[in-house]
Amino acid sequence: MAEREQFKTRLGFLLIAAGCAIGLGNVWRFPYITGMYGGAIFVIIYLGFLLGVGMPLLTIELALGRAARRSIARAYEILEQPKSHWHLNKFWQIPGSYILMSFYGLITGWLLYYCVRFFMGGFEAGLDRVAAAENFTALMGHPLTMFVCMTTVIVSSFAIVALGVVRGVERITKPMMIVLFLLLFFMAARSFTLDGFGAGMGYYLKPDWSKLEEHGLMEVLWAAMGQAFFTLSVGQGSIQIFGTYMDKKHTLMKEASFICGLDTTVALLAGVVIFPACFTFGVQPDAGPSLLFVTLTTVFSNMSGGAFWGGLFFLFMLFAAVSTLIAVFESIIAMFMDLCPVSRVKAVIINFCIVMVLAIPPLLGYNYLDFIHPLGGSSTILDFQDFLISNNILPGGSLLFVLFITWKTGWGFKNYLAEANTGDGPKIPAWLFWYYKFVLPPVIGILLIAGYVNIFG
């Protein structure tokens, strides 16, 4: 087996793995649902699920990668018991990364467009929500503009991956993530000077038991579990690939703690940036794309120096999204090279073409193909692709990973423990086998079912 390239520094691994986890969900979902479901009460419940569900799944993916030194395209064959057929599952897990990138690149292109437009003073001062929404709708109606922006971020990300793990992915992503955190801390500090800081933070983090009564305990628990689960992007092998590049100096519980900590820090500070600004200018925050492209565009256009602050915020968002693009593209290239004996550059060229072709339907879903509603109602092609990932491949893949380490025909829990506990740091106790085998699968199964009920119920 060829020697696997490794990260030069531990900081590089931690920032890149965190970059894979840190993405749009940290900003356009977490702050909003925290305020909606009770502030600090929701945060405590979320952290409980992050520790109880997210971190175990993260250590499993990292352990599979570090032990096999191969992506999921080959890891099952290396680790599974003889004559078992776990490796067949890779054929539905691998497409997940392609589906994710087919629409994530499009959204990242939107961020690039808004970043450039803000810095160039392209938004009029004093925009209201209606005008901000019309601006976003106008962008959706220009497929050529979206195509150029999308192609720019995809080409740039693939070019970095083409340089290799150390010379490309680590060398570029590490400083980019450092700048991302500096931008976030700078904008969060600035929020303390806004008039609506007290009201915004009160809405965001003040414990509000009435929200628990309003929405019901089960809905709050489901929202917290879903956020903890999806924020780490576990289940499709994107995190697993970085386990193949790491050394064995530290236990995986130690590394997973740092990754979860960085991911949660971004999510929490994003709310510190968003809510004081919204309350200062009397704008009700939304969730999803509307938060970024309508609500915050309205806020920044009404703010003194709004072109600068808006450009800075969308630059932060652009870095967060591009870090995910680079991480998942690296996973795709590693899987492709494990399956096909081609050079890295050739793998990049082939997969660039594949991703660009897959990205055309969601792009056209907002204009020429806007009559297609795969999930009914006003759903778009992008919504359907997100459904395939969020409600099927991520939870299904995570369930598979848990079963793979707890069933005798898979890798086995003892082998998982031996790998996860190698190095300096906290160890995973052997008695957690019962938790992994009898608690985690039902929890993930409930999340799978709840996702379907939420959409089709």
Image (cartoon, helix red, strand yellow):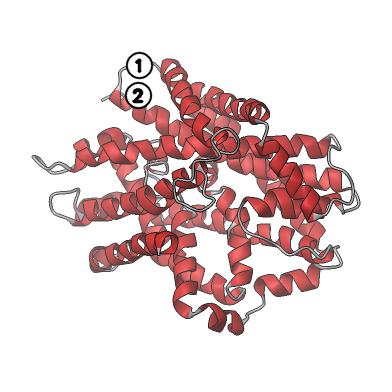
* Residue ID at (47%, 73%): 219
**Image position, residue 133 (x, y; %):** 73, 49
**Image position, residue 287 (x, y; %):** 62, 58
**Image position, residue 303 (x, y; %):** 87, 54
Check disc 2 and report its element: helix, strand or loop. helix
Q: Which residue is mark 2?
A: 337
Q: Quadrant of the C terminus?
A: bottom left
In the image, residue 85 sits, relative to residue 231, either above or below, namely: above
Is residue 36 rendered to the left or right of residue 421? right
Question: Which labelled disc corresponds to residue 232?
Answer: none
Label 2 Cα crowd, 10 Å radius (few <14 / some 14-19 / many 20+):
some
* Residue ID at (63%, 81%): 208
**Image position, residue 404 (x, y; %):** 22, 51
Q: Residue furthest front?
A: 371
Q: Which residue is mark 1?
A: 342
Quick check: marks 2 and 1 in contact, CB under 8 Å?
yes
Q: In whole angstroms, how far apart are the C-alphas of marks 2 and 1?
A: 6 Å
Q: Quadrant of the N terminus?
A: top left
Label 1 Cα crowd, 10 Å radius (few <14 / some 14-19 / many 20+):
few
Q: Residue furthest left?
A: 83
Kind of residue sitting beneath label 2: Met
Kind of residue sitting beneath label 1: Val
Q: Earlier in the sequence, mark 2 or mark 1?
A: 2
Q: Quadrant of residue 121?
A: top right
Q: Quadrant of residue 450?
A: bottom left
* Front one among 412 and 371: 371
Check disc 1 and report its element: helix, strand or loop. loop
* Residue ID at (39%, 16%): 343
* Front one among 352 and 186: 352
Does residue 426 appear anywhere in the picture? no
